[in-house]
Image: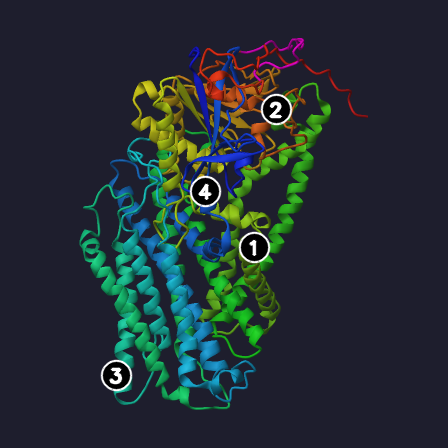
Amino acid sequence: MLIPGPDTRVVELRVHGVQGTTPESLVDAVAAVDVAGDGLGRVVRPADRLRRPAPGPVLQAGGRPVSRVVEGYVWGRMTSGGLAKATWALLFPFALANVAHWMLPPTPAGSVPARLLGTCLRALLRLAALLLTVLLVAQLGVISLDLVAAQCLAPGSGCPWGRTWAGGAPWVRALVGTAPIALVLLVLHRMSSVDWRIGRTGPPAAADPSSGLPGALVAADPDTPALRVLHLVAGLGTGVAVALGGPAGPLPAPGWHGRAIAVCWAAGIALVAVAALGAVLLDDPTGAAPHRGGRWLRAALGREPRRVLHTGAWLLLLAATALLVRLPAWHQGADLPPRLPGADLSVQLVAALAALVCLLIGLLLVPAALLARRAWSAQPRGLRPWAGGWMAAPVVAVAAMLGGGFGAGLALALRGVLGFGRLPRGYSYIVLLWGVAGVLALAAGLAVAATTGMLRWSSLRRREEWAREAALLHAGRPRDVKRAARAWWWARWQRRHSHQAVLGLAVVLVTGAVPAVFLRLKEVDPPEWSRPVSTFGVVVLALLALALLRAVHLAARRPDKARQVGVLADLAAFWPREAHPVVPPCYALKVVPELVARVREHLADPGTRVVLAGHSQGSLLTAVAAARLLEELPPEQAERLGLVTAGSQLQWAYSRAFPAVVPHSSLASLSGRLGGRWRALCRGTDALGGAVTTWDRQVFDEALLGVGFRADGTTGALPPARRGPTGALVLGGDHWLPDPQRGPFPGRRWAPGVNRHADYASDPEWDRAVAMAAGLDTGEPVSPRLSTVRSTGLPTGLPTGLPTARSAGLPTGLPTGLPTARQAPLAEPEPEPEPK
């Protein structure tokens, strides 16, 4: 333990989790002011009544008061607020495809087959992402070119909406058909160009992939600008090809008009092929090896060549629009509206290619995961990657299915609004797919609900291990034990089975695709007996489209009511653009360097110790920032750095879902480098957070035992958990908090009830964890039977809330007029009577 001196102060830099938070809630104050930042990444402190930065509450460390400054880094504006950010929900399939890239298993060093498999998998994921963009444009062509322009606006079609459009003029129909495609692609390109600028100056944060620390691979891909142009070119080429005939060939027309259509159609197909080839060959995830595959293509896709390709693709779409205006079929009225011949085949072909690529990804992931298995084979089963490292396959499959489902749902909804028109034949198979998937999902949901209820009833009766942990944590408080036990069970069930929901969704969708694919290959229309299933599929797709639009509306107008959308957006936006460029900009590439710069600024004062404190998603950001700092800082500054995580998913989710980016071994390395200055606050009632530094816990002889990271950097059995002065059980680096809290305590904010994932800073153990992370408290065990409260009535380890001269900004050595109180241990509450 480092003994605090008169000039010692602790800077507690807090980082919030997903869905944002207010600055006041983050720093636990009634008012807060900005002290640094650029408006997107804000550094805030508590404020006094004159809106001036105020000191934080005094921190008790080893029986001595230590000055504390509480700061908060607010990054919520990067992912929430406004219609522009809400529209990211429309691109959720793209984000899933991008996340799947980061879920690939690690590549063992020195293994040539594993390296080749990794290269192939990354290439296939980029190709699958490109096909999602192409599928979006093809489905948009079905809506705008076929359903609206070719059918509804045809002269004499009888469509009630078509009578208001200049009598079905050819130029109106051509513009209505191609303008939505151009507008959507323009918006996608502009959104993919959005990036966050780092507002702090100073040396860049290190990102050495070989460091073995968390998030070492989280870096911007230098190929993203080229990939962005390739997606735009593929979309424009698809729009041209669909408009001029589709995969079967160009539209027939006499004379030079027919030759021009053929040339334009061939150019569109060539653009799609070049984009697909470029997406497959570009492979430089970190920019650390510019000589890797695709060097010649990277040179060919420089700034000027990209501009030429970009401009040429737009001109080609304009030429296709002009050729549609002169198309003879669009000048002729008919009793039956004409159909765009290329729309149906385009959607079916792109969907088939996407399914084939997803199948190849699933097949290649099997040997890749087996080769990577030696990296986690020695770990307990609860710490190994989900699905044995195969999790990327179902995620990209769900992305493809959702992409097709969103487009089909919008087309069905628009046809219902128009009350007119026929959709391509392939949509009948999509409807059947989602109908079968909906029936299976409904049946599976009922089965899971029944099974879960039986398991919960059985486990509560048998008092399993988790129930004994809850009883030990709430010893002497039977009412709290009863309330906590229910929440512990639900939280534990969600943590153990959340990934199985993704697997189940993938299985349901793939199973629903089997009969649809079989009938399509046999060229057989869905039979009459399947009509109820198809009708249910229409309902499912319509609900899917309406739910998506409603979520976007809520996220734009009432962000507080769209928590699910915000959570998904925040989780997806953490990962840099790699497989798909049209995803939200990665906030980690801005947050982490700015946290690093802020910490370095504080550590320049030799009397300052900095504790990074992250809640939920903020724990991942602070862990990555701490890892970068340990790579950069000299030893005399690194030993003044600490880390506190609360409600963290680092162990139960991130290390298992992203085994190449946040492997369990990287958490062990980070813990060893910090030397006991990593404290994790956990609640058994928290379904989103869990233990970070310990596992295989069990209760034996009224003591909590377990395995975890030791302060000396090794891993193994830990001493029995110590009970802290506020009732928490400290096992290794994990502080298990009683929930409901003990108390209320004099001078402390009180958070009654079961708090689960919220309000960790209100627990009195928070301050003790900060002191231990700062290296100022050893966390020595206290007597099992805690002593009584002294006359001050203040518990040990709790802050008095009174600032010292240093924290108040007064000269040291001068009295502030605010005396501190000698704090005493918390009185053990009288045992509650058993409820009758």
Compute the Cα span from label 1 to label 4.
38 Å
Type of secondary structure dominating the magenta stretch = loop
| Upstream in sequence: badge 2 or badge 1 | 2
Residue 732 seen from this side? no
In which quadrant is the C terminus drawn? top right
SS of the residue at dot 2?
helix
| Upstream in sequence: badge 2 or badge 3 | 3
Kind of residue sitting beneath label 4:
Ala
Q: Are marks 2 and 1 in contact (CB under 8 Å)?
A: no
Compute the Cα span from label 2 to label 1.
43 Å
Q: Residue at x 50, y 87 (%)?
A: 336
Compute the Cα span from label 4 to label 2.
28 Å
SS of the residue at dot 3?
helix
SS of the residue at dot 4?
helix
Between 591 and 402, the residue placed more toward the observer is 591
Kind of residue sitting beneath label 3:
Arg
Image coloring type: rainbow
Q: What's drawn in magenta, residue-wise?
A: 781-798
Which residue matches tag 2? 469
Compute the Cα span from label 3 to label 4.
53 Å
Which residue matches tag 1? 557
* Label 2 Cα neighbours within 10 Å, binned few <14 / some 14-19 / many ≥20: many
Q: Is residue 132 magenta?
A: no
Q: Residue at x 73, y 17 (%)?
A: 831
* Label 3 Cα neighbours within 10 Å, binned few <14 / some 14-19 / many ≥20: some
Between 58 and 549, the residue placed more toward the observer is 58
Task: Point out the frontmost of discs 3 and 4.
Answer: 3
Judge from the rendering whether residue 203 lies leftward or rightward of residue 823; answer left or right: left
Which residue matches tag 3? 259
Residue 65, image x, y percentages? 51, 14
